[in-house]
């Protein structure tokens, strides 16, 4: 019995030592993205953005951003970030289940995700219930920060700000190019992302005096959009504001060409229209789309660190960095910095450090004024949007005009004249 007791004590000692070493050596962060399903191509680049940021934190780099010039988290004895991925497959119930799995089984100290606004809504409910910090990198539905959640933080600007950007852009185009932008039609998918976008597009169209001739909502993950595009075309809009994930974005562009529909401009609400698969699948037919964005590679002309990070991303993935991967990258740096300042993996201390975040513009690869969260909502108050246009298969900043590297091609060329 004595030997058995001694053996049990040794086991406890070994277990305690192993657990302590585990806690000191690695900080486990969960990430939930669509790694399979219709948006898998986006999910994969999001995950690579997170992994690149973790690698920069874990190794020594000569970059002007938090934790780049040290190895690991110095306030936690050099502990390194370990990324634990989860796949929500584009399904809200799986997103919640993955969040619960990461928290209860994988013992993550925080979660990043989930791209799709509707899935971010469910996954963050699980984090809220367990009291785990949830950093949202790229979901833009304003309602996500209107729920009174204590543990939810969002680094990216939301669709309220980004929708208003569309009308600032149109007003500037009226002044610069003397364009006629009336009327507008809305073409949006019908999940939380699309329905929230519609609400704010209608709000700012009324505020800035732009008549809307029609609204078409279509089922997300549609396999054909012919009837919806015919209805859209019947409204005879000069401008189409569109909200679609990648599969729908590609499908709609093919439908526009097939039905010879070419309004003066298609103002896309990011998402599928900036996914690397968009230009890859459509080739020249992707040209001249305008999209709101939060990042573009050509901004490196004014901020060289953007090129450095984009080149690192290209080297490791063989793909170009985009708005999605850059936002995932940024959210990871912000979270890692907060954990380091917290000097702890206790959720409450990480949450407090996130509330105290005050990251400056020159420490980011985003064209933002910085990262500073609203204490009540968890929304970053210093984000900004830009407008990009696809020209010769590449995305170029065309607005604000002081950041532009290319002039806007307007109107959208007719299909037969390309």
Image (tube, rainbow, N blue to C red):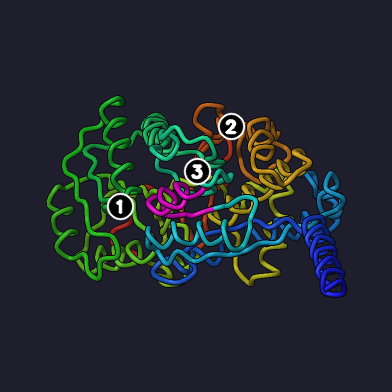
> In terms of secondary structure, where does tag 3 sit?
helix
Q: In this rendered view, identify the residue nearer to me: 263 or 209.
A: 209
Rate crowding at label 2 as few (under 14), some (14 to 19) or many (20 or more) other CA atoms within 10 Å.
many
- Of callouts 2 and 1, which one flags the residue occurring earlier in the amino acid sequence? 1
Mark 3 crowdedness (10 Å alpha carbons): few <14, some 14-19, many ≥20: some
Q: CA distance from mark 2 to mark 1?
A: 26 Å
Left or right: 268 with respect to 332?
left
Earlier in the chain: of badge 1 and badge 3, it is 3
Q: Secondary structure at mark 2?
A: loop
Q: Tell me the mark number nearer the camera, choosing from 3 and 2.
A: 3
Front position among marks 1 and 3: 3
Residue 89 percent location from the top left of the image: 42, 67
**Position of 397 compared to 97: left or right?**
right
The part of the chain drawn in magenta is 113-128
Which residue, given by chain and number where applicable, does mark 1 sit on? 191
Instruction: Name the residue at 48% across, 45% down.
Output: 129
Q: Nearer the viewer, residue 177 or 85?
A: 85
Residue at coordinates 44% horizontally, 47% vertically from top-left? 125
Are dots 1 and 3 in contact, CB under 8 Å? no
Magenta portion: prevailing SS class: helix
Mark 3 or mark 2: name the one nearer the start of the chain: 3
Q: Is residue 221 above or below residue 395?
A: below
Is 379 left or right of 281, judged from the image as shown? right
Residue furthest front as drawn: 1
Q: Position of residue 267 (x, y in %)?
A: 36, 47
Question: Residue 373 got which mark?
Answer: 2
The residue that label 3 is drawn on is 128
Question: Residue 10 has which mark?
Answer: none
Give the CA separation, mark 3 to mark 2: 17 Å
Label 1 CA crowd tier, 10 Å (few <14, some 14–19, many 20+): some
Looking at the picture, tell me which residue is in the foreground, 56 or 363. 56
């Amino acid at each position: 019995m004595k030997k058995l007791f001694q053996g049990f004590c040794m086991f406890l000692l070994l277990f305690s030592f192993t657990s302590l070493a585990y806690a000191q050596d690695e900080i486990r962060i969960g990430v939930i993205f669509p790694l399979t399903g219709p948006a898998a191509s986006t999910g994969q680049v999001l995950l690579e953005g997170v992994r690149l940021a973790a690698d920069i934190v874990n190794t020594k780099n000569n970059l002007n951003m938090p934790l780049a010039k040290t190895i690991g988290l110095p306030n936690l004895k050099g502990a390194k970030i370990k990324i634990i991925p989860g796949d929500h497959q584009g399904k809200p119930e799986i997103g919640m289940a993955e969040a619960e799995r990461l928290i209860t089984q994988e013992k993550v100290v925080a979660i990043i995700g989930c791209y799709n606004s509707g899935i971010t809504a469910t996954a963050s409910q699980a984090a809220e219930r367990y009291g785990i910090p949830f950093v949202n990198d790229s979901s833009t539905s304003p309602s996500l920060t209107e729920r009174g959640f204590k543990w939810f933080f969002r680094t990216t600007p939301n669709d309220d700000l980004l929708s208003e950007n569309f009308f600032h852009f149109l007003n500037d185009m009226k002044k610069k190019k003397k364009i006629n932008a009336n009327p507008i039609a809305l073409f949006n998918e019908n999940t939380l992302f699309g329905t929230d976008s519609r609400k704010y597009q209608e709000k700012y169209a009324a505020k800035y005096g732009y008549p809307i001739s029609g609204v078409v909502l279509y089922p997300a993950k549609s396999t054909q959009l012919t009837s919806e595009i015919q209805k859209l075309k019947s409204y005879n809009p000069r401008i189409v504001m569109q909200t679609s994930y990648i599969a729908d974005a590609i499908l709609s562009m093919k439908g526009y060409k097939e039905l010879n529909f070419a309004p003066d401009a298609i103002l896309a609400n990011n998402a599928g229209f900036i996914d690397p698969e968009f230009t890859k699948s459509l080739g020249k037919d992707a040209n001249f789309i305008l999209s709101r964005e939060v990042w573009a590679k050509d901004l490196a002309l004014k901020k060289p660190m953007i090129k450095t990070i984009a080149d690192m991303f290209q080297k490791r993935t063989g793909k170009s960095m985009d708005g999605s991967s850059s936002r995932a990258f940024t959210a990871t740096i912000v979270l890692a910095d907060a954990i380091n300042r917290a000097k702890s993996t206790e959720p409450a201390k990480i949450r407090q450090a996130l509330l105290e975040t005050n990251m400056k513009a020159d420490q980011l690869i985003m064209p933002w004024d910085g990262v500073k969260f609203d204490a009540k909502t968890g929304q970053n108050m210093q984000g900004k949007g830009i407008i990009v246009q696809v020209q010769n298969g590449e995305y170029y900043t065309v607005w604000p005009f002081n950041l532009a590297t290319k002039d806007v091609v307007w109107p959208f060329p007719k299909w037969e004249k390309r």
